[in-house]
Image (cartoon, helix red, strand yellow):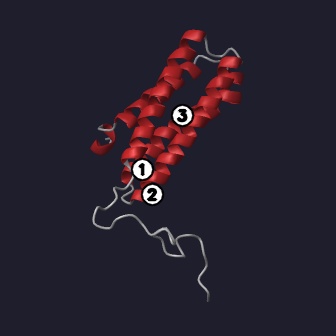
Amino acid sequence: MIPEEMTNLKVYDLAEKLADDVWTAVMEWEDVEQAALGVELVKAVDTIGAVIAEATGRRGFQGNRRAIRLARGYLKCTEHYLRRAYRRKLLNDKDAAALKASVDELTLVLDGYMARAEPKEREDEGPPSRRGGGYSPRDRGHRSPR
């Protein structure tokens, strides 16, 4: 059911595990707590895996990198909601420590995945020129003189 290229990614597996662990924790909260904080937390953590899955479907380097950066943003959002949950005494010390360890591991693996998604420099071209940076004026954000 899940495409093989996603299931072979450690980063995707870690995102799924974190999402499942967060879901388990949030299901123990009262209705008011779930509505106030739990819904946002679950949305953020579920979106990490969804965006990683989207990145695997992108063929271009820039689209892939953009999706990975978006996943990193949702991971930061998840960290925020987990801190809020801990400060509001919705997570005990043991659960908070386990979730923090999962977030830290996912952060490291996601950063490594991002680094591997960088394009390799061609050896035959050499470095870009200093004056233009190797990009056309349009790529640097300049408008053409029309």
Per the model, the C-alpha gap separating discs 1 and 3 is 16 Å
Kindly identify the amino acid type of the residue bearing the numbered disc 2.
Gly
State which quadrant residue 114 falls in.
top left
Per the model, the C-alpha gap separating discs 1 and 2 is 7 Å
Q: Residues within 10 Å of mark 2 (few under 14, many from 20)?
A: some
Q: Is residue 126 left or right of residue 66?
A: left
SS type, badge 1: helix
Q: Which x, y percent locates residue 48?
A: 50, 39
* Disc nearest the viewer among 3 and 2: 2
Q: Residues within 10 Å of mark 3 (few under 14, many from 20)?
A: many
The number of numbered badges drawn on the structure is: 3
70 w.r.t. 119: above or below:
above
Q: CB of mark 1 within 8 Å of CB of mark 2?
A: yes
Asked whether residue 43 is in view, the answer is no
Per the model, the C-alpha gap separating discs 3 and 2 is 21 Å
The residue labelled by disc 2 is 63
**Residue found at the far bottom of this picture:** 146
Task: State which tag comes first along the sequence, 1 or 3.
Answer: 3
Task: State which tag comes first along the sequence, 1 or 2.
Answer: 1
Q: Quadrant of the C terminus?
A: bottom right
The residue labelled by disc 3 is 45
Q: Residues within 10 Å of mark 1 (few under 14, many from 20)?
A: many
Nearer-the-camera pick, 80 or 40: 80
The residue labelled by disc 1 is 55
Q: Is residue 44 left or right of residue 88?
A: left
Kindly identify the amino acid type of the residue bearing the numbered disc 3.
Val
Kindly identify the amino acid type of the residue bearing the numbered disc 1.
Ala
Q: Which x, y percent locates residue 17?
A: 43, 27
